[in-house]
Image: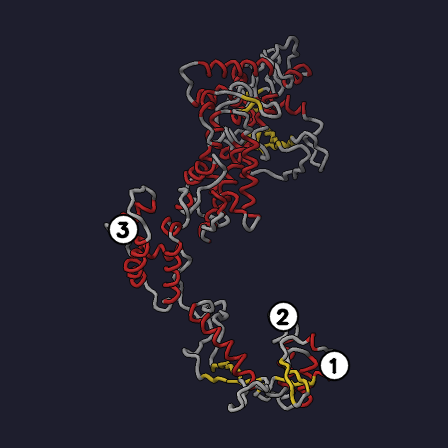
Amino acid sequence: QKDLSTNLFSGTTRKIAECTPRKSHSTPSCDQPGMPVHSAISLDECQHAPDLSGFEATASIPRYRNLWLCDAKWFELMRYHVREMKDIEGVTLSVFIRALNRHYKNTMDVFTPGQNTTGVFHMSFTMPCPIQDTRRKVHFYYVTKKGTTVNRPTEVGLKFTEINRQTIVPLGPPLARSTTTTAATSTATTRTAVTAAASDESQPSKRARVESLLDTESDAYYWKSPEAAKLFLGIDGSLKRGKSKQNDHGEDTFEGVDIEQTMADRIRVLKSVQQEVDGWKKIVYTHDVHDACSPSDVFILRQKSLFLSRAYELALDKMPFATWNDCCQQAIDELSVFGFTLATYSRTIATWNQSFRKFALFPHPNPLVASGLPVEHPVFANFPEAKNKLIAFARENLETLSVDSLHAFVNDKLVPFITAGTTNDDDDTPTKRIIRRWQVKLPSPVTAWRWLHSCGFSYDAAKKSFYVDGHERAENRQHRKVFVTNFLTKWEPRCHRWIQIPVQELPGMQLSAESIRGGYFYNVDGKEMVECHVDDKQIFMDRANGATQFGGWLSIRRDMALKPLIIWGQDECAFQQHRYSPKQWVGPDGTRAILPKSDGYLMMVSAFQSRDLGFAWKLSAQELGIVNRKRENEHYVDMEAA
């Protein structure tokens, strides 16, 4: 038995020279249903022992890990994935169980956290075998990452049976674990075969190339194959001829590209889309430097990154023993539980991969950006004055703007303006082609509507708002000059905002004639005087407030034939009887308060204020306190005016 268990884990297939016969027992086996099985097999009947390095290779496949699989299922999987197992005579389930239990006997029954260092756990129950329904002592093995804590199952039942019967199905071609050649010999044979295939004029099929790689060592070769490079990176050309290179770490790759590492990097970028506010810009063509993506486009890009990153993770974990279609469908099934339904068919994710794989970027949702055309219409790019005219027309007629009025303006004024500014040469530029087309057919209403949208205008629901942007209109700029001139030279001199001071009194106010800028100097009966605005110095305002009723004197430069002025400011505030929030609370059963159909009576309060008399609305001390408390800790743009 010692020689037998040694041979099972030796990595080779050796003949057993000396074996001691044992008595047989009549416990049924899954190897041959209905036939007796030897729990202690007669070793004279066993010519060879299986290579259980194949068990370790089978257990390394992610699909078979972290599940309680019975001995018959493990034996079936190992015979499937290791071809040599089928050619060894006398290797039965009992031999496999005995060797496995002997090899891991010190750790596999230990469920104490941190004590099981192999990652292989064992439990046995007397029950019907999940594979053949024959009642016997069934051994269950659980393979996981070394050091992982596993809870001991207290009972078995339908769950264990269903897992072994339905869930675990061998996927992909078998793994040929050569037991007669060394790893170095296998690698050399593989490279020779690949080189020969590259030099042969008749290229082998894709399936033949994949199986030839899988037949040599393991599934790791798939991620160095041209098929993987074409599927996930879109790399073509020399890869079809199987040319192999080494990366910076000396590992065999195609064209020096580490496909697995590249996939891991792309998964990290795709996940950052959900982790950063502008993370979606990393995966779109031009990174949306033109801000041409709509909120709907951003929503779709975020979901695409979610589906594709999960499908890539499953591909790294399961392929080539699962197909790319299987990985896409599993990603859809997992994410649909959380309400992500942008993709419902595996082909959808496969199509996204085709557009993403080559440059790790999705095409831009805006067709102009995606096709490389300028975002701005070429006519506007060459005639910015035309764009300004279109914007000016839309702003001036914003209240009554319609597609019909816009279309009439474009055809009657804008197109003639553009054509008048071009020459009649035969240049074949895009702009000239467009203008020549207008000579045959003028722009349609849809074209005019698109132009307006490209200028930033949008058609939205009517709602209350305010927008003031008429300050720089030509008529306003002209009126501004007239208003300022009249206010400073005609109106303000008639207001009580001035002070006249003898020049000899300036030193007593810690001032000098040179320090007063803008003052008006004059003589009264040989006495030199200066007139200043009370706003020029704080001391002027304090003196005027203490000596006059209105905070200053009239200017001596005013028109004496005109009466003094008091300039008033006015504002109003409207109060409605039934004014409610645009939203309301609704009960669990859908009940809500019944609101009036109209806003009811309206009351408007109008208030006046002047510099001379102050706020005309008389406030009580209590009301003034309320106003001042409301203004506390407020930050105003013009603190002095506030």
- Classify residue 104 by image quadrant: top right
Q: Which residue is rendered at x = 44% and y = 35% of the image?
A: 325
Distance from disc 1 to disc 3, alpha carbons, whole Å, reads 76 Å
Question: Residue furthest toward the top?
Answer: 17
What x and y, as percent, mark residue 476?
45, 71
Instruction: Give amino acid for label 3.
Output: Trp
Q: Return the mark for residue 509.
A: 1
Q: Return the mark for residue 438.
A: 3
Residue 560 visible in the displayed image: yes
**C-beta proximity under 8 Å, tags 1 and 2:** no
Q: Which residue is rendered at x = 59% and y = 11% of the image?
A: 47
- Classify residue 29 by image quadrant: top right
Q: How many marks?
A: 3
When the figure is inspected, residue 188 is found, relative to residue 560, above or below; the finding is above
Element type at marker 1? Answer: helix
What x and y, as percent, mark residue 114?
72, 36
Instruction: Give amino acid for label 1.
Output: Met
Q: Return the mark for residue 635.
A: 2
When the figure is inspected, residue 616 is found, relative to residue 247, above or below; the finding is below
Element type at marker 3? Answer: helix
Q: Nearer the viewer, residue 517 or 629?
A: 517
Task: State left or right for residue 217 relative to residue 329.
Answer: right
Task: State left or right for residue 439 relative to residue 74.
Answer: left
Q: Return the mark for residue 342.
A: none
Distance from disc 3 to disc 2, alpha carbons, whole Å, reads 55 Å
When the figure is inspected, residue 444 is found, relative to residue 356, above or below; the finding is below
Element type at marker 2? Answer: loop
Q: Which residue is rendered at x = 27% and y = 48% of the image?
A: 437
Mark 1 or 2: in front is 1
Distance from disc 1 to disc 2, alpha carbons, whole Å, reads 34 Å
